Image: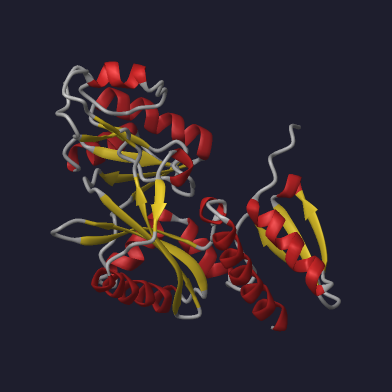
Amino acid sequence: MPKFPQRELERIINLICLKNHWKVEWFADGWICAITAAKQPQYIFGYNFFINDVSSSKICSDKAATSEILNRAKIPAFVHYYFRNHFYHEQELIATFKKLKNNVVIKPNEGTSGIAVLHCTKQKTFLKEAIRILTEYQTLAISPFYAYENEYRLVIYQQHVVIHYQKHRPYLIGDGKHSLAQLIKIHKIHNAEILPIKNIPKNGEKIPLTWKHNLGQGAKITENIPLPLLNRLTKLALKVQKLLGIKFFSIDFAVTNQWIKVVEVNSGVMLEHFAGINRKNFQRVYDLYFRVLKDALKR
């Protein structure tokens, strides 16, 4: 089995344990970690810390369940329709596709990092890819396609926002001369999802290369969230925390001039890209993880 690159989380946990004389062991190629401060080891699974209870973590990892719980509590969130392998009919998939006006996003119901997330507007493509996801991942979430420019992430611990930032999609800048296809070739871009590529953008026009805001797929971070907006997002995030009973989590919001909606809630707090930007950010994540571990080991 090939060795995965060391994660920022692994580096940080090792440093914390070394400094505090805690025993640390890694399993599953660095995906699971056991930390022993007294007699009983405590485990980190992926990015899920043992400060959260199992029920809250499982709900957050289930996109459809989270969506239903939040919307029923009148917290606006992206709607997700849930399907399980061996427990669906193709006509149910097609009916959902048509109900959502032939413009949907499909993904594994418990997936992460934008992997196997597809925007579908053609029934044939939708059905083929939906069945593929069900076969490979066993579960499927179907949601309407929401068009929006701005996405924000808040990291919450113990009823406080500890880290926040905006995610900016990668983009090209038009020069008024070249088509999108030509610009893509000039800049040697291999994973663009923009259409139609024959258009010639205006000089200075920004053209997003993808509709996704995933950091693992090229999005960039800035921390300049306007204070009034940050306050609104914080208020919603704390409502989610109280509703789900989760102590340490991240939450993504989609924002337009008309609405704010929860995109997803993550009990696994992944801060790889944030920590990797500079030494200051690395230290902020170190301090946060240490605080969470210290509190969890006291229990």
How many badges with numbers are in the image? 0
Tell me which residue sits at (50%, 40%) in the image.
138
- Image position of 271 (left or right of 25): left
Q: Quadrant of residue 141?
A: top left
- Image position of 155 (left or right of 280): left
Tell me which residue sits at (52%, 63%) in the image.
267
Image coordinates of residue 188 in percent, x first then y, are 41, 20
* Residue at the bottom extreme of this rendering: 298
Tell me which residue sits at (20%, 22%) in the image.
196
Image coordinates of residue 223 in percent, x first then y, are 38, 61
Quadrant into which the N terminus falls: top right
Q: Is residue 20 above or below residue 177?
A: below
- Image position of 1 (left or right of 75): right
Q: Is residue 42 visible?
A: no
Image coordinates of residue 282 in percent, x first then y, are 59, 60
The one of 86 and 108 positioned closer to us in this rendering: 108
The one of 8 and 111 positioned closer to us in this rendering: 8
Q: Quadrant of residue 50?
A: bottom right
Q: Quadrant of residue 283?
A: bottom right
Quadrant into which the C terminus falls: bottom right
Image coordinates of residue 254 in percent, x first then y, are 28, 56
